[in-house]
Image: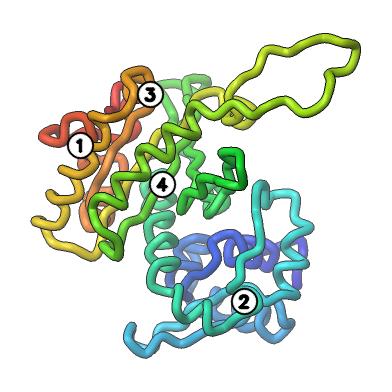
Amino acid sequence: MDAGGGDRLALAVVAQHRMATTEQMHLMIAPGARVEQTRRRLAKLRDEGLIDRVTLPQAGRTRAWFVTQYGAEVAGGFAELRDWRPSRLATDRTAARLRAGHVLTVTQTALAFVQDARRRGDMCQPLDWIPEVYHPLGGGEAVIPDALLYYRRTGDSEHDWSMLRAFVEIDRATMGPERLAAKIGAYERLYRYVPVPVGRPRGGTVQEAQEEWRRRYPLFPRLLFVLDGTGSAGVENRLSALRAAARLAGADYIRQVPILAAPLADLLRDGPSAPVWRPATATEQSVSWVAPSAG
């Protein structure tokens, strides 16, 4: 592996995104080069035992790449893979094949944000999308979003920018609308969760307890639901369920945390920054997720 060049980036992207097709990898890491260069790079990493692939017959024999156990060990030493946790896909080809549909949809969503940022002059690199970040709720429970997104929005001048963060949930219509909407309540639990201090503080100083999420984020991330695998009627059913769940949430949580939903098809057609998002509190509206007042 060429540690100082594109090989390291390719391995890091495959590892962090869990799985990606050849086309997705090409558009992530080398959109300005010929696709043959990306194919050769992936083949080289496979020859070195760092990544492997499964072929998906139902998708026109598309090749989907994932890290091996050895590749996960190597990538685990990369400083740029913050919050990264190895996936079962690295040791189980069957798990890789069975989870390919969901994982590749998550990667496709990530690619939409990366490409949109490039067009807008914003900053969202492939490694700014971090799948499955563990957020404890106490008692062995946790919230694990499909992805945590970091997105730097550029303003009117060089020094005018803002950092946006979002929890992203991808719904492929494999669960009922009510189960999807229940995630709003799960994130509210995370919003309010204050861990119980263990042991006596040094020096006898008692620190004021605070919510666990404040250890990671200056503001609670936005909550984005990306809807796929269903037609317009299914989308409306899911929006209705999200709206009902938002009505049951605390007013402070709803006021502070934008909760938005959009069909994946709209994101791919118009770009994630377009006004294709429907606020859970006002599903008749359409807004941009990057707008300061979104939600």
Give the distance between the C-alpha atoms of the residues marked 3 and 1, in whole angstroms. Answer: 14 Å
Which class describes the residues within 10 Å of circle 2: few (<14), some (14-19), or many (20+)? some
Instruction: Identify the residue at horizontal 57%, vertical 51% (top origin).
Output: 127
Q: CA distance from mark 2 to mark 3?
A: 46 Å
Q: CA distance from mark 1 to mark 4?
A: 17 Å
Amino acid type, mark 2? Arg
**For discs 2 and 3, the disc positioned in front in the rendered view:** 3
Q: Which residue is mark 1?
A: 243
Q: Which residue has dot 3 on it?
A: 253
Please indicate whether residue 271 sits to the left or right of residue 78 in the image.
left
Image marks 2 and 4: residues in contact by CB distance under 8 Å: no
Q: Name the quadrant containing residue 289.
A: top left
**Foreground residue among 48 and 238:** 238
Marker disc for residue 168: 4
Other-residue count near label 1 (Cα within 10 Å), few / some / many at <14 / 14–19 / ≥20: many
Quarter the C terminus occupies: top left
- Mark 2 lies on residue: 41
> Which structural element holds mark 4?
strand
Q: Is residue 269 visible?
A: no
Residue at point 24% right, 47% down?
Answer: 262
Location of residue 73 with respect to 141 vertically, above or below: below
Q: Residue at x 67, y 27 (%)?
A: 196
Task: Report the mark closest to the observer, 2 or 4.
Answer: 4
Nearer the camera: disc 1 or disc 4: 1
